[in-house]
């Protein structure tokens, strides 16, 4: 049986999300902000983040994946959903669940920059640095870990555990 070790409790996650939403609301005041959630893992984070913002935003999603049912990155990014909203001259904020190697994020930044937005920045729930392969700047991040495979709060392992309100380290 896989073991779940608690990493972040629901209440702590909520405080982190509220605090980062406060910074974003202040930084993007009077700007046209579009949040781009990265499916599927960021859906819970994005919905909480959006509800803590005090500025109007538009919301769209991309579906990018580099993981199959394994816990290690294949290194190959597959974009199965592109955005519908026109982001030309708008401020774009990518909302990502976890940045691990950084390959997904680098790919998404290049994709979104090709659509001529005013700016592209990144907000990640978890910054997991040990296996980082690309130099990518996380403008906003809620929590940092060195390593470990995390589940819960939208994060899955083979589509399980996304519904859990807390975040756990999954030990297989
Ligand atoms: P990267 O391209 O940075 O290596 O990986 C980014 C994507 O891999 C994340 O959006 C996420 O979907 C997945 N990922 C990376 N680390 C974890 C983890 O610890 N748990 C889960 N559930 N997914 C992860």
Image (cartoon, rainbow, N blue to C red):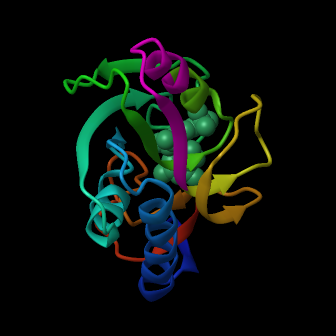
- Judge whether 72 appears above or below 156 on screen: above
Write down the region rendered in magenta.
Answer: 108-124
Magenta region includes residue 15? no
- Judge whether 3 appears above or below 149 on screen: below
Residue 48: name its quadrant. Answer: bottom left
Tell me residue 68's x, y (percent).
45, 31
Side (left or right) of 102 relative to 89: right
Magenta region includes residue 119? yes
Q: Residue furthest front?
A: 30
- Judge whether 131 appears above or below 54 on screen: above
Tell me residue 132's x, y (percent).
76, 38
Q: Residue furthest bottom?
A: 11
Tell me residue 154's x, y (percent).
36, 58
Q: Dividing the image into four quarters, tell me where ligand 1 lies.
A: top right
Side (left or right) of 73 relative to 63: right
Residue 65 visible somewhere in the drawing: yes
Tell me residue 126's x, y (percent).
59, 58
- Judge whether 116 appears above or below 164 on screen: above
Q: Where's the C terminus, which quadrant?
A: bottom right
Side (left or right) of 122 relative to 90: right
């Amino acid at each position: 049986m896989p073991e779940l070790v608690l990493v972040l409790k629901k209440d702590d996650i909520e405080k982190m999300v509220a605090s980062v939403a406060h910074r974003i609301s202040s930084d993007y005041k009077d700007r046209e902000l579009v949040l781009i959630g990265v499916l599927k893992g960021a859906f819970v984070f994005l919905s909480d983040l959006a509800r803590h913002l005090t500025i109007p935003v538009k919301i769209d999603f991309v579906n990018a994946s580099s993981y199959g049912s394994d816990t290690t990155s294949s290194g190959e990014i597959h974009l199965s959903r592109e955005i519908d909203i026109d982001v030309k001259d708008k401020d774009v904020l990518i909302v990502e669940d976890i940045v691990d190697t950084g390959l997904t994020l680098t790919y998404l930044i290049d994709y979104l920059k090709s659509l001529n937005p005013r700016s592209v920045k990144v907000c990640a729930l978890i910054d997991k640095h040990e296996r980082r392969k690309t130099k990518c700047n996380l403008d906003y991040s809620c929590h940092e870990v060195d390593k470990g495979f995390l589940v819960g709060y939208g994060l899955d392992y083979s589509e399980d555990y996304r519904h859990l309100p807390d975040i756990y380290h999954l030990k297989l």
